[in-house]
Image (tube, grey):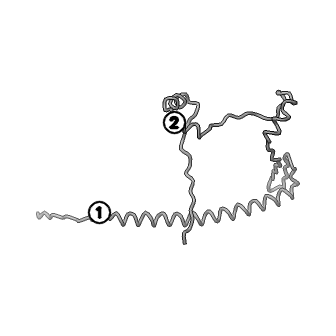
């Protein structure tokens, strides 16, 4: 029986080829993203127009809920008032309102600027805070913005 030696020369992908494929893939995805973003924006505008029409047809209250059933659909409209607190005005009147009746709350939030300053300037304190579990971190979704250059 004869034996044959076969050697197949496989060319390693060229770095430029990989970079070109990578750019082509990015371009395709950016184009698709742009197309879908446009469709999403148009659909969102149309949905909001329909919501305005429905709110009028079901006599949505300024504040509260109303429900209309057609036999095919049930449409629930919830009206709400956007309320904002003017802290300076509140502080002026707060002393005249019993604390138990205050219509405001104090909310603790992370001061990211200070937290980052502690992380770089006082690593021991940062570790103490981190190990306590008082502040935890997890990766969020990246924000993507695509802009056509041509």
Task: Quadrant for residue 85, please give it.
Answer: top right
Of the image marks 2 and 1, the number of the one nearer the N terminus: 1
Q: Which residue is mark 2?
A: 119
Q: Which mark is nearer the camera, 2 or 1?
A: 2
Instruction: State the residue at coordinates (19%, 64%).
Output: 7
Instruction: State the residue at coordinates (82%, 51%).
Output: 77
Mark 2 to mark 1: distance in Å?
45 Å
Q: Nearer the viewer, residue 67 or 112?
A: 112
Indicate the position of residue 45 as horizontal and vertical percent values: 73, 62
Q: Nearer the viewer, residue 46 or 85?
A: 85
Residue 44, compared with residue 78, is above or below; it is below
Quick check: marks 2 and 1 in contact, CB under 8 Å?
A: no
Q: Considering the image in quadrants, where does the N terminus appear?
A: bottom left
Q: Nearer the viewer, residue 150 or 27?
A: 150
Q: Which mark is residue 12?
A: 1
Secondary structure under tag 1 reads loop
How many circles with numbers are drawn on the protein? 2
Residue 103, compared with residue 139, is above or below; it is above
Indicate the position of residue 43 as horizontal and vertical percent values: 69, 63
Indicate the position of residue 76 as horizontal and vertical percent values: 81, 50
Secondary structure under tag 2 reads helix
Mark 2, Cα crowd under 10 Å, few <14 / some 14-19 / many 20+, is: some
Mark 1, Cα crowd under 10 Å, few <14 / some 14-19 / many 20+, is: few
| Residue extending furthest toward the left | 1
Q: Considering the image in quadrants, where does the C terminus appear?
A: bottom right
Indicate the position of residue 66 as horizontal and vertical percent values: 85, 49
Instruction: State the residue at coordinates (78%, 62%).
Output: 49
| Residue extending furthest toward the bottom | 150
Task: Quadrant for residue 71, please give it.
Answer: bottom right
Left or right: residue 124 versus residue 63 is left
């Amino acid at each position: 029986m004869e034996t044959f030696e076969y050697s197949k020369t496989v060319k390693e992908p060229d770095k430029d080829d990989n970079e070109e494929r990578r750019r082509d893939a990015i371009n395709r995805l950016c184009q698709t993203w742009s197309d879908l973003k446009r469709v999403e924006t148009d659909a969102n505008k149309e949905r909001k127009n329909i919501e305005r029409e429905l709110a009028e047809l079901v006599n949505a209250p300024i504040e509260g809920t109303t429900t209309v059933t057609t036999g095919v659909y049930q449409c629930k409209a919830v009206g709400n008032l956007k309320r904002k607190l003017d802290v300076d005005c509140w502080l002026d009147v707060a002393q005249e309102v019993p604390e138990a009746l205050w219509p405001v709350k104090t909310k603790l939030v992370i001061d990211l600027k200070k937290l980052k300053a502690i992380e770089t300037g006082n690593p021991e304190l940062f570790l103490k805070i981190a190990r306590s579990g008082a502040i935890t971190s997890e990766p969020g979704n990246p924000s993507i913005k695509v802009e056509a250059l041509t």
